[in-house]
Image (cartoon, grey):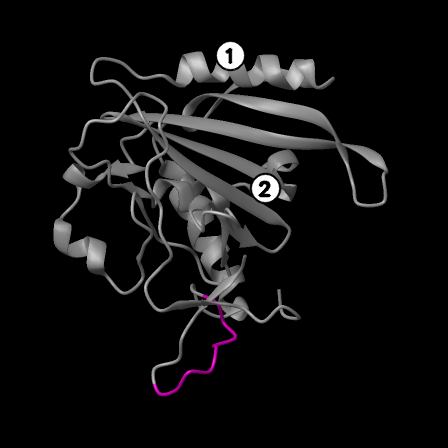
Amino acid sequence: MIFRRKGKNDDAETTGGFFGDEEDATEATDAVDEVEESAPVGRSAGPFDSSEVDPSTLEAEDRIDLGALVITGLPGMELRLQVDEQSGEVQAILLVLEDSALELRAFAAPKTSGIWSEVRREIAAEATRMGGTASETEGPFGTELVLVVPVEDPEGQIFSQTSRVIGVDGPRWLLRATVLGRAAVEPEAAPPMEQALRNVVVVRGSEPMAPRESLGLRLPEGAQPAAEEEA
């Protein structure tokens, strides 16, 4: 489901999405390239836990509060939400820029240790079971997976889909990010997706949760579904 932010003066949907107009995307990508050249490996440059940022910045105009995740996109990015039709619950966030996408999901984790290494092995085993391949590689966020799995399109054609699965262990949470499209196979297209991931703030909350339980997501304030023909 695609969402747009309401206009200030009426109920009409804006056409620029949540993160500015597409003509700004090239300039934003150039800026991301400069940042990525000096970005350290790991979580020191993000994504962040809510305890690691100034609370007032979470309400900044360029940030979108989605419950457990507060995101900051780039100009030209489109926000899509995967919503369960029966329950109405938001299951995942998808940030789309041109022909690349970044899927975000957050889960509870134990206090004592991260769970990405364990989850990573399970994802790799599932990809193999599906007839695909999974290989570990070192990326800007640590060890990640490159998956190549068979996928069937609506016409019944089978093709191989490549994705990068990134896991970031934080304080009592795991943020799982899946890079799709061109950014998954062409390194020069990856920096905007990686910067969008670094911009994420995880709001874990203090309530007890079972490890791997999904952290709650919600619709952004002022959002409404895009028209069906537009989507």
Q: CA distance from mark 1 to mark 2?
A: 27 Å
Q: Is residue 46 visible?
A: no
Q: Is residue 166 visible?
A: yes
**Residue 13: in magenta span:** yes
Residue 1: image location, x then y, percent: 54, 57
* Residue receiving disc 2: 188
Q: Residue at x 49, y 49 (%)?
A: 83
141 vs 89, nearest the viewer: 89
Name the amino acid, label 2. Answer: Glu
207 vs 145, nearest the viewer: 207
As helix, strand or loop, the secondary structure at mark 2 comes to helix
As helix, strand or loop, the secondary structure at mark 1 comes to helix
| In-image side of 7 versus 207 (left or right) | right
The magenta region covers: 9-17
Instruction: Tell me which corner region of the image, top left, top right, bottom left or bottom right, holds residue 134.
Output: top right
Residue 93: image location, x then y, percent: 46, 46
| In-image side of 131 versus 72 (left or right) | right
22 vs 173, nearest the viewer: 173
Picture layout, residue 21 above or below residue 198: below
Label 2 neighbour load within 10 Å: few <14, some 14-19, many 20+ = few
Majority SS type along the magenta span = loop
* Residue receiving disc 1: 121
Instruction: Tell me which corner region of the image, top left, top right, bottom left or bottom right, holds residue 48.
Output: top left
Residue 124: image location, x then y, percent: 58, 15
Who comes first in sequence, dot 1 or dot 2? 1
Name the amino acid, label 1. Answer: Arg
Query: Which one is closest to the eye, mark 1 or mark 2?
Result: 1
